[in-house]
Image (tube, grey):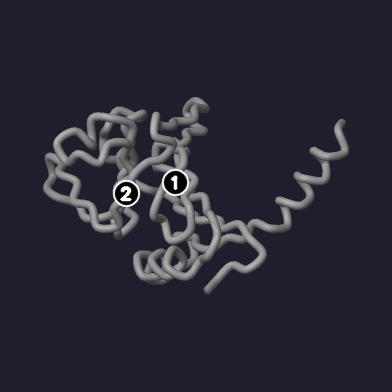
Amino acid sequence: MNIDIVYLNFYFLYQWRRLFTSQMEETPANCLQAAIGYHIGPSTFVIKTASGAIIGGCVEAKWKVCYFLFQVEPSASIYTTKSGQFFVNHDENYVTEAGNMKGFGLYEDDDDATKWSTSHIFFSSSLDLCVASFLGDKPMKIEAFEVWGFGDELYD
């Protein structure tokens, strides 16, 4: 094995910190907003649905831009855009048959008319439901939600 790869794996292993988990927080939406607002480096969010799907994305500091979305289960894939980034809206309104949901939208196109026609993930502010284009655009119950941050200095 290449020594550079071993070093990088060792280095990155100790730089990642869990910033948020829905499994331990009493008020998930407030704690998630704080984790996003005060973290100064890039982070990764991971969502596990009640049906077993695992999806997520890699975002820059303060969640202004998402670099890629991914799916681990039921199959592994990475989703990117031609522009190299997904738009992130912290106050998105997603319309479903059951009504409107407020939350976070990560989508490829900034044009309101077409933003949900491309690769996207939406998750509600209450962290109870998510929708992903690559999982059939059906609202799914969130079982677990975590955010992991990277960097020497984690907070402002």
Please state which of residues 120 and 62 is positioned toward the viewer in this rendering.
62
The residue labelled by disc 2 is 123
Q: Find numbered disc 1 in the image and state the secondary structure of the residue it sits on.
A: strand
Q: Amino acid at mark 2?
A: Phe
Q: Residues within 10 Å of mark 2 (few under 14, many from 20)?
A: many
Q: Quadrant of the N terminus?
A: top right
Instruction: Say whether disc 2 or disc 1 marks the residue closer to the N-terminus.
Output: 1
Q: Residues within 10 Å of mark 1 (few under 14, many from 20)?
A: many
Residue occupying the point 42% across, 46% down: 66
The residue labelled by disc 1 is 47
Q: On the picture, is 123 further left or further right than 117?
A: right
Residue 39 circle label: none
Q: How many marks?
A: 2
Q: Find numbered disc 2 in the image and state the secondary structure of the residue it sits on.
A: strand
**Measured Cα–Cα span from mark 2 to mark 1:** 9 Å
Label pair 2/1, CB-CB below 8 angstroms: yes
Q: Is residue 115 above or below residue 61?
A: above
Q: Is residue 15 above or below residue 80?
A: below
Q: On the picture, is 142 further left or further right than 19?
A: left
Tell me where residue 99 appears, x and y as whole percent. 12, 47
Residue occupying the point 83% across, 39% down: 4
Picture quadrant where residue 116 is located:
top left
Residue occupying the point 29% across, 52% down: 89
Tell me where residue 153 appears, x and y as whole percent. 63, 68
Q: Is residue 13 above or below residue 133?
A: below
Q: Amino acid at mark 1?
A: Ile
